[in-house]
Image (cartoon, rainbow, N blue to C red):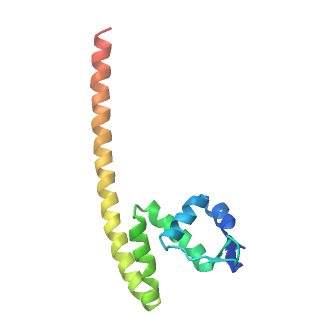
Amino acid sequence: MQQQRKTFSISDLKREFSVTLRALRYYESLELLHPTQVEGKTTRIYNRRDRARVKLILVGKRFGFSLAQIKEMIDLYDLDQGKTQRRVVLAKLCEQRLVLEQQLADKLQALEELNENCKILEHLERQNK
């Protein structure tokens, strides 16, 4: 039902995406979002494109991209209706997948070493009792 609407308030986006007003204002200051303001008021009106951008920002953050990287990828859409954007995003996603896989392998190795050290220290502790 939200997707059928044409405009959204800052509170609507806050509620839908569980983000803070401060975060939405920050995204706006970075020019990731472009709401219109009601004349003479501080009310922000977001359109469907802004709503989609919030979704993309949150997905990008979950994947480990910086806001600058997310902005770069989102802004590419306007070049040629997304053709360049798709190519660049695919490359960046594949690259990020390799980064996350390496981080996962590093964490698993650290966990294995941690478990081994715990076992050694637990054994030593039992011997000292």
Instruction: Provide residue 35's location: percent of width, then percent of height.
Output: 60, 76
The answer to whether 119 appears left or right of 64 in the picture is left
The structure residue drawn at horizontal position 49% and vertical position 74%, both measured from the top left corner, is 31
Query: Considering depth in this image, is 31 or 60 the residue closer to the camera?
Result: 31
The structure residue drawn at horizontal position 29% and vertical position 56%, both measured from the top left corner, is 102
The answer to whether 105 appears left or right of 33 in the picture is left
The structure residue drawn at horizontal position 32% and vertical position 28%, both measured from the top left corner, is 118
Q: Residue furthest bottom?
A: 80
- Is the C terminus in the top left, top right, bottom left or bottom right quadrant? top left
Instruction: Provide residue 13's location: percent of width, then percent of height.
Output: 64, 66
Q: Residue furthest top?
A: 129
Instruction: Provide residue 16's location: percent of width, then percent of height.
Output: 65, 64
Query: Considering depth in this image, is 17 or 127 the residue closer to the camera?
Result: 17
The structure residue drawn at horizontal position 32% and vertical position 46%, both measured from the top left corner, is 108
The answer to whether 105 appears left or right of 72 in the picture is left
Instruction: Provide residue 9's location: percent of width, then percent of height.
Output: 69, 70
